[in-house]
Structures are given as C-alpha cells and as structure tokens.
Amino acid sequence: MKQEIHEKSIDTASQAMLWKAKEEGMETVWDRYEKQLPQCGFGQLGVCCRNCNMGPCRIDPFGEGADKGVCGATADIIVARNLLRMIAAGAAAHSDHARDAVLTFKKMSEGKAGSYRIRDETKLLSIALEYGIAVEGKSCEEVAAELAHALLLEFGKQDGNLLCTKRAPGPRLKLWTELGIEPRGIDREIVECMHRTHMGVDNNATHILLQGLRTGLSDGWGGSMIATDVQDILFGTPQPRRSTVNLGVLSREKINVIVHGHEPILSEMIVEAAEDPELLKLAQEKGAIGINVAGICCTGNETLMRHGTPIVGTFLQQELAVITGAVEAMVVDVQCVMPSLGELTSCYHTKFISTSPKADFPNTLRMEFHEDRAYEIAKEIVRAAVENFPNRIPEKVNIPEEKQECMVGFSVEAILSALGGSPDPLIEAIKSGAVWGIGAVVGCNNIKVMHNHGHVTLVKELIKNNVLVVTTGCNAIACAEAGLLLPEAAELAGDGLKTVCKALGIPPVLHMGSCVDISRILLISSALANRLGVDISDLPAAAAAPEWMSEKAVSIGAYVVSSGVFTVLGTVPPVLGSQAVTALLTKDLNNVVGASFAVEPDPFKAADLMLEHIDEKRKALGLES
Ligand code: XCC
Ligand code: SF4
C-alpha cells in the first residue's frame, strides 16, 4: 500500500517537507511504516504473550490452532493483561513526570533550585488548603515545603487512598469506593499492575480491567493533576494569549531552538535563556538577528500556554522540522521523541541534545539537566545552538510559509474568568441549547491515520453541531494549525455556539494545555456537574482521541471513562482478540462506571456517536433535545 504524499498529511507545510525529504533521500516515519506492513496480526489483536519464558505464546484468532498459552492463559487473559501493562506504562509516564515536577518544587522550597520561584501564590495557597495544610503565618516557601511533602506522599502512600481524588464530584467518588477502584498510592497502583500481570497471578479479565481503571484514575486525578498543579504554581497558571503554529514559525534569520518532549521544567529555563543579553549578543556575532524558541508535542504546549512561544508542530512533524534544514538544536527531554531523530539530525547541521537523566537517544549530545544549575545548563544548551548557526547550509534550508495564528491558554481559571467568574453562563448556554454539549478531543498523531485528518475533521463536525470543544496535546496543535483556535473560527460553528463564542470573544475550540492537563478537563467537568447537582456521567459531554498512539493515551482513556465520559477511539486498540474484553470496554463498562469506549476510525461517524450520546444525556437531564 504505497501512499502518495498528499495522502500522508492534510497539512500543506508537512507535505512540502515530505517532498523535500524525498528529494534529499531522507527516511521518515511514513517510510518506516510502509516497511512494517503488513503489521503482525497477533499483535494487532493483542493475543501475543511474552510475560514468561515458556512463551512467547499466541492464540489463534481463527480458532484452528492453540486456544491457550503454555500456562493455560486464554485470549481473554492475555488481552486483558497486555492492556493492563499499557495502562501501567502510560500512568507511569505521566506520574513520573509529575514526581519530577514535585521534586523540583521541593528543591525550590528548600532554596536548592535557585532559578525557580513561585509564580502563582494563589494557587499554592488554595491547593495547600485542599491538602489540609495550615497556611496562616507561614511564608510561601514554608507552605511549599509542606505541600511538596504531602504531594510526595501521594506517590508512595502505603495505606489509605489518594487525597487528590477528593476533587471529583461526590457521587463519582462514592461509586469508585463502592467498586473498589478508588486509587491508593500512585506508585502502588502501577507496581500492582506489573505484579498482577506476572505469570500466574491475576487471570480474570474483568478483575484485571478493574485494576486498569484504578490505575488510570491514579494518573488522571493523581499524577497528571499533580503535574498540572505544581507546574502552574512554579510557572504560572495559563491565561489566554496569542501565538503562532506550524513549520513556518521557524525563522530564516534567527537561531532556531526546538524544545520537544513533555517536561516544562527545562523548557521554561530555555525560554528564559534565549532572552539572555549575553547569548543575544553572541547570536548577533554569529550573524543571526535573535533566538527563536519553538516547541513540538507537549513541552511545546507547556511553553505555548504560559509564554506564547510558537509551536512547530505535532508528533508527526518532528522529523519534518529537522528536514527544513533550519534547526540549530533539537532539545529533547522525555516521551514521544522518535529515536530516528539521531540519524536524521546527523544528515543536517542540527544538534540533537538529550537532557533527561532518564532518556537518551542515538547520536545525541548529552547535556543532562539538573535543577540546582537549571539556568546555567539552559544557557549552555542555547549557546550550543547559537554556535551552531554558522553551520547552517543555506542550500539545504527550506522553511514552509505556513504559519497560523492561534489563541491559547484556557486553564480552568481562565475559562471561569472568561465566563465572568462562575460556570453559570456556560450552564445556561447548555440548558438553552446554544451550546449543545461539550466535546473533549485529545491525543496524539498516529501514522495509521492521515496526519491531522482525524483531529480536524472530527472537531469541525462537533463545532458545526454547536458542541464546544476542549482540547489538549497534539489534537490542540492540529486544531491550531487548521485555524480552529481563533475567535474567528466561530464562523465555522453552528449558530448557537457562534453567538456564545462571539459574546465571550473565545474560540469554539479551547486549548487547555498539554496531555497532563487533561486533568483540567476533569476539573471543569466536575465544576459543571457539581453546579448542576449531577454526576460527570450525566453531563451532555463526550470525549475522543481520533489519532491516539501512545500508552499514555490508554491510561487517559481508562481514567476518562472511569470518570464517566463516553470516549471514542479513532485507532483500534489491541483488544479485538478477546470478545470478552471488547464487550467489557464497549458495553459492560456502562453498567459499572456509567460510560464506555467506542472505536470508530471514520471521524464523521465518530462525531455522530458523540452527538448521539450528547443527545441522550440532554434528554435524561430534561433539556431540549
Ligand atoms: Fe500523544 Fe499526548 Fe505525545 Fe502528542 S505529545 S503524541 S502522547 S498527544 Ni503529549
Ligand atoms: Fe505463555 Fe503463559 Fe508465559 Fe504468557 S505467561 S508467555 S501465555 S506461558
């Protein structure tokens, strides 16, 4: 199955770079995908097990060969175990990121992370109170130290349940307790997943999946939410601002430093270092007119939300950025960084700089990041980029024109303030039907889907039908590239939503942040549910991940559904090898947590499923439908 370039991405800038790659003989993720085809059918169905060395075992999906692994594990057991391991890995990624944020916060409170300070005192104090910390008569640093301690306990808690889940609406929390899926320590849930999936431990698909829900919850209401909270305290809670996206944000005359990955701890410092007079002077000496920091993936979303730093692209554009020939440094931390960048950057002048003590890649320049010397290290990294500018090869540079304006920064705080301080105007708009419902559309790019097609088509369908969309992660970047994150995009919305957006001066698609910031979506949903006196599962709301690929997305799916939100997946998860697990996820979960998954690769049909669900919920609430 050979794809033409125009079939690979809906984005013309990306298409242009794919042409350039072809001319220059560069390999991209699209080429490597083609070489993988056909992909392994056992893997796609989830029926392959490597959990012990009597295997690998695989179940014959046609019922003609083996129907059990060597130990006797059935397809149901194997599929459920594999899924649980995906959830564990995803929750671990988010939560370990959160841990590092808390450890930086702790060091800051002890005066051992000099470059960091408290940027949102109000948030510090209100969260401290939630964790039962008395704040009166204490300095911010003292409160921060106590809060850091309380937050660290959430990871290593040995008895009792997480405190952070207490933010969920009463009925939801009660349901989790009754089901026995109220999460305990964050690390404990992840460890227990690994234990349960070891050979000969948990061998009941339903029982395994319940642990999946609990682990997901420890991510969404735990790790991810803690990451968002602490990052807001340290770097500021996002407020609406404007910026630009797509490959065209790279500069011809400036030094381009790309920050890629997920943790704002480093990128915040890089943004600052890029304004350092000493480095700006050096940049001029090297013949550049300035230093341009731009992002990819969620590190990009973090600096975009807080500083308006431009974004170069989504997950599938990381190689294309290098292919412009205009990137002096690709600076990466953790998650969603393709190891292919090593070989690719070595074909250009681009320095590939890996910074996390946890994550290295082929052919990188290691510049390990440590908080105690944060600013100095950030300066060294930017300096390496500046010094690399003269190595740019003019004949190899081709920066696409495409650059799209966007409005971002819709934290819960910002949304509430746009609404005049309370969720009531939004609730009135939902009641009147002007806003028909809320759609949360999130998640990655996946090479199996035409780049950004799933995201943009689905979101356009939703707003056309008056569904207000909240977005994070790569979906948000895709929407930005398509011009949907502008107040002017209200013209693409149905009449009701258009009127509401115009009255408030907001876009019909609200960028709420990075993937850990899906915690913000949980909180705004809780605020709406509480105000209406219902559970989250009663809201006229639905979620989708049209192009998801990462294990983090599986953990997100687990907590979004466990929180009561119907979720449509645009790429097929590896579960179809078990009818029982498939039925549990797509049907039976409704009777357990009041929500379930659907799988629908066609974005138009996915929108229809979400709209049908929203209609049903409106009817049940006695709203016009
Ligand atoms: Fe997915 Fe999370 Fe990565 Fe983008 S960056 S590819 S996880 S959407 Ni958060
Ligand atoms: Fe095979 Fe069972 Fe070992 Fe898995 S745990 S590899 S199914 S024997």
Image: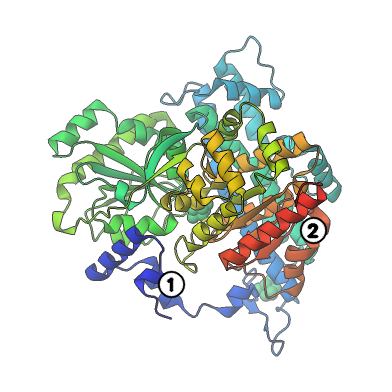
Q: Amino acid at mark 2?
A: Asn
Q: Is mark 2 within 8 Å of ligand 1?
A: no
Nearer to us in this view, 243 or 432: 432
Q: Residue furthest top?
A: 137
Q: Which residue shows up at 28% across the image and 59% down it?
A: 323
Element under disc 1: helix
On the rendering, which quadrant does ligand 2 occupy?
Answer: bottom right
The label shown at residue 33 is 1
Label 2 to label 1, Cα distance in Å?
Answer: 35 Å
Instruction: Please give left or right for residue 144 compared with residue 323 in the image.
Output: right
Nearer to us in this view, 155 or 98: 98
- Image quadrant holding the N terminus, namely bottom left
Q: Which residue shows up at 58% across the image and 50% down it?
A: 494
Examine the rendering and report whether any part of residue 198 can be seen. Answer: no
Mark 2 or mark 1: whose residue is earlier in sequence: 1
Nearer to us in this view, 202 or 577: 577
